[in-house]
Image (cartoon, helix red, strand yellow):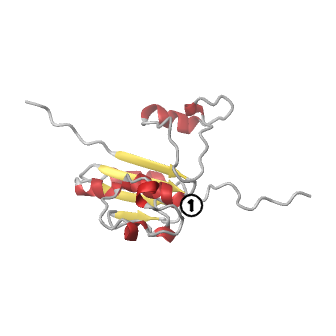
Amino acid sequence: QREAIQPYNIIYITLEDLSPHLGCHGDTLIQSPFLDAFAQEALLFEDAHCQVALCTPSRTSILTGIRPSTSGIVKIDEDWQQVLPDVVSLPRHFKNNNYYTHALGKISDPRSGGMDDAWNVKEEEWSIKNNALIPATLEVVKSKEQPFFLAIGYGQTHDPWHPAEQH
Protein backbone atom coordinates (compact mmCIF):
# COMPACT_ATOMS: atom_id res chain seq x y z
CA GLN A 1 0.00 0.00 0.00
CA ARG A 2 1.34 3.43 -0.95
CA GLU A 3 1.85 6.06 1.70
CA ALA A 4 -0.14 9.25 1.16
CA ILE A 5 2.04 12.15 0.05
CA GLN A 6 1.56 15.30 2.10
CA PRO A 7 0.86 18.33 -0.10
CA TYR A 8 3.51 21.01 -0.12
CA ASN A 9 2.94 24.50 1.22
CA ILE A 10 3.83 26.96 -1.53
CA ILE A 11 5.22 30.47 -1.24
CA TYR A 12 5.33 32.36 -4.53
CA ILE A 13 7.39 35.57 -4.46
CA THR A 14 7.30 38.01 -7.35
CA LEU A 15 9.18 41.26 -7.89
CA GLU A 16 9.13 43.70 -10.75
CA ASP A 17 12.42 44.23 -12.60
CA LEU A 18 14.54 42.02 -10.34
CA SER A 19 17.96 41.56 -11.82
CA PRO A 20 19.51 38.08 -11.57
CA HIS A 21 22.63 39.68 -10.09
CA LEU A 22 22.40 37.77 -6.80
CA GLY A 23 24.74 35.40 -5.02
CA CYS A 24 22.34 32.48 -5.57
CA HIS A 25 22.74 33.07 -9.32
CA GLY A 26 26.53 33.07 -9.09
CA ASP A 27 27.26 36.79 -8.81
CA THR A 28 30.31 37.32 -6.59
CA LEU A 29 29.99 41.11 -6.32
CA ILE A 30 26.43 41.43 -5.01
CA GLN A 31 25.83 40.58 -1.35
CA SER A 32 22.38 38.97 -0.98
CA PRO A 33 22.72 36.65 2.04
CA PHE A 34 19.04 36.32 2.92
CA LEU A 35 17.91 35.55 -0.63
CA ASP A 36 20.87 33.20 -1.07
CA ALA A 37 19.95 31.29 2.11
CA PHE A 38 16.31 31.11 1.02
CA ALA A 39 17.37 29.88 -2.44
CA GLN A 40 19.23 26.97 -0.79
CA GLU A 41 15.90 25.62 0.51
CA ALA A 42 13.59 26.80 -2.27
CA LEU A 43 13.12 25.92 -5.91
CA LEU A 44 15.31 28.39 -7.80
CA PHE A 45 14.51 29.07 -11.44
CA GLU A 46 17.90 29.64 -13.05
CA ASP A 47 16.81 30.22 -16.65
CA ALA A 48 13.64 32.30 -16.42
CA HIS A 49 12.70 35.01 -18.91
CA CYS A 50 9.70 37.23 -19.47
CA GLN A 51 7.93 36.96 -22.81
CA VAL A 52 6.88 40.62 -22.94
CA ALA A 53 8.74 43.37 -21.08
CA LEU A 54 5.60 44.61 -19.32
CA CYS A 55 4.15 43.43 -16.02
CA THR A 56 0.58 42.59 -17.09
CA PRO A 57 1.47 40.12 -19.85
CA SER A 58 4.15 38.53 -17.67
CA ARG A 59 1.95 38.26 -14.58
CA THR A 60 -0.98 36.96 -16.61
CA SER A 61 1.23 34.34 -18.24
CA ILE A 62 2.52 33.12 -14.89
CA LEU A 63 -0.93 33.09 -13.26
CA THR A 64 -2.69 31.37 -16.18
CA GLY A 65 0.03 29.33 -17.86
CA ILE A 66 -0.89 30.94 -21.19
CA ARG A 67 1.76 32.71 -23.29
CA PRO A 68 1.07 36.34 -24.30
CA SER A 69 1.32 35.28 -27.95
CA THR A 70 -1.56 32.86 -27.33
CA SER A 71 -3.71 34.99 -25.01
CA GLY A 72 -3.16 38.21 -26.97
CA ILE A 73 -2.44 40.08 -23.74
CA VAL A 74 0.55 42.26 -24.58
CA LYS A 75 -0.32 45.62 -22.97
CA ILE A 76 -0.53 46.83 -19.37
CA ASP A 77 -4.21 47.78 -19.28
CA GLU A 78 -5.78 44.60 -20.68
CA ASP A 79 -8.20 42.91 -18.26
CA TRP A 80 -7.03 39.29 -18.21
CA GLN A 81 -10.31 38.09 -16.68
CA GLN A 82 -12.32 39.51 -19.60
CA VAL A 83 -9.90 38.21 -22.23
CA LEU A 84 -9.62 34.76 -20.59
CA PRO A 85 -12.96 34.31 -18.75
CA ASP A 86 -12.80 30.51 -18.49
CA VAL A 87 -9.17 30.12 -17.46
CA VAL A 88 -8.28 28.37 -14.21
CA SER A 89 -5.73 30.65 -12.59
CA LEU A 90 -2.86 29.35 -10.47
CA PRO A 91 -4.53 30.38 -7.17
CA ARG A 92 -7.86 28.92 -8.42
CA HIS A 93 -6.12 25.60 -9.10
CA PHE A 94 -4.80 25.51 -5.55
CA LYS A 95 -8.11 26.62 -4.01
CA ASN A 96 -9.91 23.94 -6.04
CA ASN A 97 -7.49 21.42 -4.50
CA ASN A 98 -8.20 22.37 -0.88
CA TYR A 99 -5.42 24.91 -0.39
CA TYR A 100 -5.81 28.07 1.64
CA THR A 101 -4.91 30.93 -0.74
CA HIS A 102 -3.51 34.22 0.51
CA ALA A 103 -2.23 37.12 -1.61
CA LEU A 104 -0.02 39.74 -0.02
CA GLY A 105 1.04 42.55 -2.34
CA LYS A 106 1.00 43.02 -6.11
CA ILE A 107 0.21 39.68 -7.68
CA SER A 108 -1.88 41.08 -10.54
CA ASP A 109 -1.88 44.69 -11.62
CA PRO A 110 -5.13 46.31 -10.39
CA ARG A 111 -5.22 48.32 -13.66
CA SER A 112 -5.55 45.10 -15.67
CA GLY A 113 -8.35 43.25 -13.94
CA GLY A 114 -6.64 42.73 -10.63
CA MET A 115 -6.84 39.45 -8.78
CA ASP A 116 -9.57 36.95 -9.35
CA ASP A 117 -11.84 35.65 -6.58
CA ALA A 118 -9.69 32.56 -5.97
CA TRP A 119 -8.05 34.12 -2.92
CA ASN A 120 -9.26 33.49 0.61
CA VAL A 121 -7.51 36.74 1.57
CA LYS A 122 -6.10 39.63 -0.50
CA GLU A 123 -3.99 42.34 1.15
CA GLU A 124 -1.99 45.34 -0.06
CA GLU A 125 -3.04 44.85 -3.68
CA TRP A 126 -0.69 47.53 -5.05
CA SER A 127 2.43 46.31 -3.27
CA ILE A 128 3.92 45.31 0.03
CA LYS A 129 4.87 48.49 1.84
CA ASN A 130 6.11 46.89 5.02
CA ASN A 131 8.07 43.65 5.28
CA ALA A 132 6.81 43.29 8.85
CA LEU A 133 3.56 41.99 7.33
CA ILE A 134 5.27 38.85 6.07
CA PRO A 135 6.00 37.08 9.40
CA ALA A 136 2.47 37.81 10.61
CA THR A 137 1.00 36.51 7.36
CA LEU A 138 3.14 33.37 7.58
CA GLU A 139 1.69 32.72 11.03
CA VAL A 140 -1.84 33.13 9.64
CA VAL A 141 -1.34 30.70 6.75
CA LYS A 142 0.47 28.16 8.92
CA SER A 143 -2.42 28.19 11.40
CA LYS A 144 -4.90 26.89 8.82
CA GLU A 145 -5.90 23.25 8.84
CA GLN A 146 -4.94 22.86 5.19
CA PRO A 147 -1.93 23.38 2.93
CA PHE A 148 -1.41 26.93 1.75
CA PHE A 149 -0.50 28.88 -1.37
CA LEU A 150 0.92 32.24 -0.28
CA ALA A 151 1.73 34.79 -2.99
CA ILE A 152 3.93 37.74 -2.01
CA GLY A 153 4.25 40.55 -4.53
CA TYR A 154 6.65 43.44 -4.50
CA GLY A 155 5.75 46.21 -6.94
CA GLN A 156 7.22 49.47 -8.08
CA THR A 157 10.81 48.30 -7.95
CA HIS A 158 11.09 49.51 -11.53
CA ASP A 159 14.04 51.36 -12.89
CA PRO A 160 13.22 55.07 -13.17
CA TRP A 161 11.03 55.71 -16.18
CA HIS A 162 12.17 59.34 -16.37
CA PRO A 163 15.89 59.63 -15.61
CA ALA A 164 17.15 62.82 -14.01
CA GLU A 165 18.40 65.44 -16.43
CA GLN A 166 22.17 65.70 -16.81
CA HIS A 167 23.57 69.05 -15.66
Q: With respect to residue 48, does 66 lie above or below?
A: below
Q: Residue at (54%, 65%) from the top-left corner?
A: 76
Q: Is residue 45 visible?
A: yes
Tell which residue pokes out farthest to the left in this image: 1
Q: With respect to residue 77, does 17 lie above or below?
A: above
On the rendered structure, is 59 left or right of 155?
left
Q: Which residue is at the front of the view, 11 or 69?
A: 69
| On-image quarter of the C terminus | bottom right
Tell which residue pokes out farthest to the right in this image: 167
| On-image quarter of the N terminus | top left
Residue 11 place in picture, x, y as percent: 40, 47
Q: Which residue is at the front of the view, 73 or 142?
A: 73
Q: Amino acid at mark 1?
A: Lys
Label 1 belongs to which residue? 129
On the rendered structure, is 7 left or right of 65?
left
Residue 111 place in picture, x, y as percent: 51, 70
Residue 142 place in picture, x, y as percent: 33, 50
Q: Residue at (33%, 68%) from the top-left corner?
A: 85
Q: Which of the 4 quarters of the picture holds residue 116?
A: bottom left
Residue 41 place in picture, x, y as percent: 43, 33
